[in-house]
Image (spheres, rainbow, N blue to C red):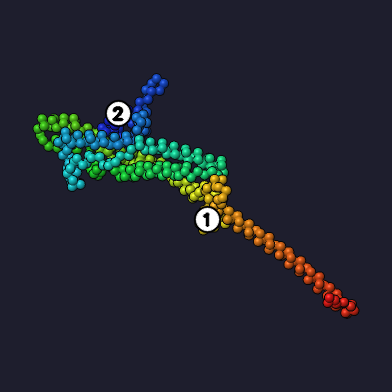
Amino acid sequence: MIRELIEKIASGEWSPRRPIEVPMYEGGSQQIRMVPLESQVRLASHQGGIHPLKLYHMIQRKIYEDMLDRVDRSRIFKAKVFSILCDWEGECQLVEMFDDPIDEEFDYDQYKNDRDLIASYQKNMNRYEEELESNAGQGVDRKRINDLQSECDGCMHKLNDHREILLGNLNQYDPNYMDVWTHMATKGDSYYRDDIQKNPDPKYQAFANKQIDRVIPRNIQDVFLNATLIPILMKQENRMLLKSINELYASLQEDAAKLKYLIRQIPESDEPSQKSLIESIFEGLGFEESKSDESTLSDEEDPPTSASKIAEQVKSIVEDSDDEDDAEDEEDDEDADDEDEDDSDEEKTSQKGGLETHVLTFF
């Protein structure tokens, strides 16, 4: 089906500007159905396992090859095209007119493989998000997040490469010297035969008409027209691919932002520090925790002093000091109470007008 499609479009029999007739068999009888060329191209692409953009490019190259073959085989065709190219463009190299302008063709098969890798990554990412939700955000694995981030960056890089190729191809679908192609699409069969009538020799006229019929199809203007319309369909497929790539790239950007946020939330050490402030101070002063086993020391050897033991001793001293301060505060409170009672007695004595007799004993 692909071969037939390419041949009929390259020969001008089928064209994007009109629907094509497709025979259909329904109820045991044949019916003719009018189908747009784009629909037929998509059907053929699906059956052939290629992308429509690839099929359009194959049609385009077939048109170039056939035109170059006509230039080589027909002196009349070559002269007609040559005259317009030289007059309009000042360029008299016909070969360049039929060169393929696409430098690097978009590889849909590679894109499909990369898309499968992206789907695998997204599956892993979704599974990890579900685990985080079920664990209420606990148990975040730094290594796993780093692996996912690396995988996400790789997927974004692949998509960006495909996007750059499509953007570069977008301006390369038009044939070289597009104006000449468009102008030739307005020239019918009579344009190539008008010089024949100038020669009165009937033998020459018969020979020339036979050569034209053998090399130049009567609908040659449709072939030139197809060469100018196919790029429009190629740009349409290009933009559809760009849209899908951009949407996929945007979803990866969201994943990258999530992973970056998770990495910022993870502490450098997964194990929280259990050291007290005093231990940290003494370790900063050079007292390292002893790693030796005290049970291996002899009875005469004293175990090395560690930062934790020094911290415990300092803490004990501080607590003892706090207890002594509390005791002194209680004694001061008792003395204050006694002084208050003495003051109260003196006030009572003064109120009696000094009638009481006090006995003073010196010995």
Query: Mark 1: few, some, or many residues within 10 Å (few <14, many ≥20)?
Result: some
In screen coordinates, is 201 left or right of 348?
A: left
Residue assigned mark 2: 4
Whole-angstrom CA distance, mark 1 to mark 2, is: 88 Å
User: Helix or strand or loop: what does disc 1 sit on?
Assistant: loop
Q: Quadrant of residue 224?
A: top left
Q: Residue at x 37, y 42 (%)?
A: 158
Residue type at tag 2: Glu
What is the quadrant of the C terminus in the image? bottom right
Q: Quadrant of the N terminus?
A: top left
Q: Look at label 1 and name its amino acid.
A: Phe
Using the image as rendered, state which of residue 288 and residue 353 is in the foreground: 288
Q: Residue furthest top?
A: 28
Residue 40 horizontal/vertical position (percent): 35, 31
> Does residue 193 show up?
no
Look at 31% across and 29% down and name the residue there: 2
Residue nearer the viewer, 259 or 174:
259
Percent x, y of residue 145: 47, 44
